Image: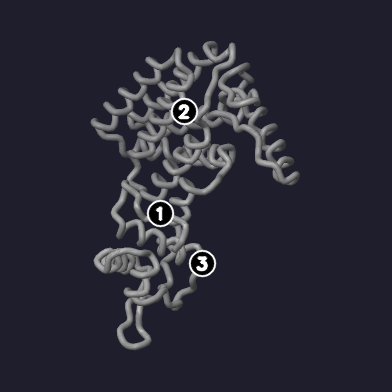
């Protein structure tokens, strides 16, 4: 049997088996037309019931990833996945593969203005209420750096959920998920409290523009957010840091320095250093 345990309480065994075979097809471990085996062979290989194999194959057929051929030389064969299926797999992989949080932040910064303008264009009354609620959570968490950071991410995630563009929405939220999973141990430095006010003001501007449906104002607020996270606004000392490094919450110079150090670490064969918190 392969290494991954099919007894995942979060999904059925059929879904777990389907995901295992799906990963093989999408990662190129098997080529289109390759025979994965008969249903009986799959049942024996993975130690599951025939009903589990039948359901897993049905799921994979619905996803366009396998074909079932009858006859003595028949069985379950890999299909050519569509470009959209491959794109979905690459986005999903962000949540499971080792990625540098700094890389995720760089791409997220590039998407921020698009996401924010889309939110302003499509914001409903219920969306507006949800954004105001999350803004209140950020305000309430001002004295707790870890809670503040979680509230910040939650706000950005909710903004992204407004767009009807599923590719944009899923990519952005996957980047947030990957970043959040990498940045779990957050400790404040002495200047964090001095930066909370500006961060709250900045995010209030973003929310106000989105709620007002003002696309130009939303674009400017998002540009200001990106400018702060990339360090092009006047430097603000201190912030949040993780581990032994001392990157500031939004100091682009620290982010760039971290990227250089991480690059050297990779060339030296060592794991990358700590990453700055967004």
State how far apart marks 2 and 1 are (Cα): 46 Å
Residue 221, given in percent of the width and then of the height, sits at: 46, 28
Nearer-N-terminus badge (2/1):
1
**Residue 218 relative to residue 62: left or right:** right
Residue 30, image x, y percentages = 49, 71
Q: Secondary structure at mark 2?
A: helix
Query: Residue 37 or 99: which is nearer the viewer?
Result: 37
Q: Is residue 127 left or right of residue 273?
A: left
- Within-10-Å neighbours for mark 1: few <14, some 14–19, many 20+: few
Q: Residue 161: give x, y in percent of width and height.
A: 34, 39
Q: Label 3's element? A: loop
Q: Are marks 2 and 1 in contact (CB under 8 Å)?
A: no
Q: Which label lies toward us, 3 or 1?
A: 1
Point 41% across, 17% down: residue = 141
Label 2 vs label 3, nearer the camera = 3
Q: Residue at x 62, y 32 (%)?
A: 274
Residue at the spot of label 1: 5
N-term-proximal mark, 3 vs 1:
1
User: Nearer the observer, disc 2 or disc 1?
Assistant: 1
Q: Which residue is mark 3?
A: 28
Q: Identify the residue position indicated by label 2 in the image.
A: 221
Residue occupying the point 45% across, 57% down: 87
Cα separation, mark 3 vs mark 1, equals 21 Å
CA–CA distance in space, label 2 to label 3: 42 Å
Q: Residues within 10 Å of mark 2 (few under 14, many from 20)?
A: many
């Amino acid at each position: 049997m392969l290494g991954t345990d099919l007894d995942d309480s979060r999904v059925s065994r059929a879904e777990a088996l389907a995901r295992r075979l799906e990963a093989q097809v999408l990662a190129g471990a098997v080529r289109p037309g390759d025979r994965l085996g008969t249903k009986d062979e799959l049942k024996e290989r993975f130690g599951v019931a025939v009903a589990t194999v039948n359901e897993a194959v049905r799921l994979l057929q619905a996803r366009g990833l396998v074909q079932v051929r009858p006859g003595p030389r028949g069985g379950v064969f890999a299909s050519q996945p569509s470009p959209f299926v491959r794109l979905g797999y690459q986005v999903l992989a962000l949540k499971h593969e080792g990625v540098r949080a700094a890389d995720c932040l760089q791409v997220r910064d590039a998407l921020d203005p698009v996401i924010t303008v889309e939110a302003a264009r499509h914001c409903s009354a219920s969306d507006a209420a949800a954004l105001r609620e999350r803004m209140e959570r950020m305000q309430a968490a001002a004295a707790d750096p870890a809670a503040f950071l979680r509230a910040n991410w939650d706000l950005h995630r909710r903004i992204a959920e407004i767009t009807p563009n599923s590719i944009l929405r899923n990519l952005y939220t996957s980047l947030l998920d990957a970043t959040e999973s990498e940045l779990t141990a957050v400790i404040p430095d002495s200047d964090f409290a001095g930066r909370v006010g500006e961060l709250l003001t900045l995010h209030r501007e973003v929310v106000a523009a989105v709620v007002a449906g003002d696309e130009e104002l939303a674009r400017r607020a998002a540009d200001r957010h990106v400018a702060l996270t990339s360090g092009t606004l006047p430097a603000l000392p201190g912030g949040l840091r993780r581990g032994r490094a001392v990157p500031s919450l939004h100091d682009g110079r620290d982010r760039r320095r971290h990227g250089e150090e991480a690059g050297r670490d990779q060339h030296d064969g060592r794991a990358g250093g700590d990453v700055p918190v967004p």
